[in-house]
């Protein structure tokens, strides 16, 4: 069996962070596009805060939603650069890192940044 050169290194982010990011971004999307349908009263302090932002700062909430996805896009592009720098040369593996980083942001990108390929000096 040949030793892996790290060209196809991929690690899935933890289920905890996948759920947290998915629920958070889903709630954010709900409050931006369907603010009248959100049951603010059932959500306690989070509902009161969300209602306040929707009622008094909606443009910030609206444009902030788009900014969130732009930031995730730049994180995904940075993941592509990090893959190149670390010698991850498998196209399918790079696509996995890009997709995971786009969807889950820093929780994925940090795993990629922490990866130290064999034979490469550790940067400080």
Image (spheres, helix red, strand yellow):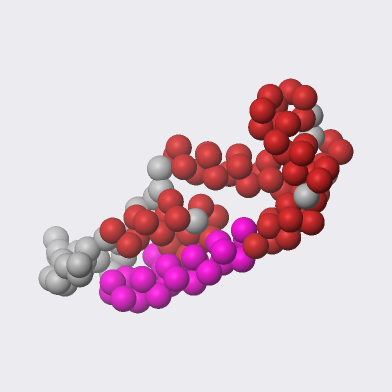
Q: Is residue 28 left or right of residue 105?
A: right
Q: Which residues are magenta?
A: 68-96
Q: Is residue 75 left or right of residue 116?
A: right
Q: Residue at x 22, y 63 (%)?
A: 116
120 is higher (above) or lower (below) than 24? below
User: Per the image, is 70 magenta?
Assistant: yes
The quarter of the picture where the N terminus appears is: bottom left
- Closer to the camera in the image, 68 or 89: 68
The quarter of the picture where the C terminus appears is: bottom left
Location of residue 22 by image quarter: top right
Q: Is residue 94 left or right of residue 121?
A: right
53 is higher (above) or lower (below) than 44? below
- Closer to the camera in the image, 76 or 45: 45
User: Per the image, is 124 magenta?
Assistant: no
Q: Residue at x 31, y 76 (%)?
A: 85
Give x and y (percent) for residue 7: 28, 69
Location of residue 27 by image quarter: top right
Residue furthest front in the image: 56
Location of residue 120 by image quarter: bottom left
Does any portion of residue 122 appear in the rendered image?
Answer: yes
- Closer to the camera in the image, 110 or 54: 54
* Magenta span main SS: helix
Q: Residue at x 14, y 71 (%)?
A: 121
Give x and y (percent) for residue 67: 65, 62
């Amino acid at each position: 069996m040949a030793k892996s050169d790290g060209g196809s290194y991929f690690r899935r982010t933890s289920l905890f962070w996948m759920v947290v990011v998915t629920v958070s971004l889903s709630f954010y999307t709900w409050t931006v596009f369907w603010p009248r349908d959100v049951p603010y009263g059932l959500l306690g302090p989070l509902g009161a805060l969300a209602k306040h932002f929707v009622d008094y700062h909606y443009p910030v909430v609206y444009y902030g939603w788009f900014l969130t996805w732009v930031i995730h896009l730049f994180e995904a592009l940075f993941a592509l650069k990090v893959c190149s720098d670390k010698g991850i040369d498998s196209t399918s593996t790079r696509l996995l890192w890009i997709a995971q980083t786009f969807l889950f942001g820093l929780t994925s990108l940090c795993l990629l940044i922490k990866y130290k390929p064999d034979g490469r000096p550790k940067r400080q």
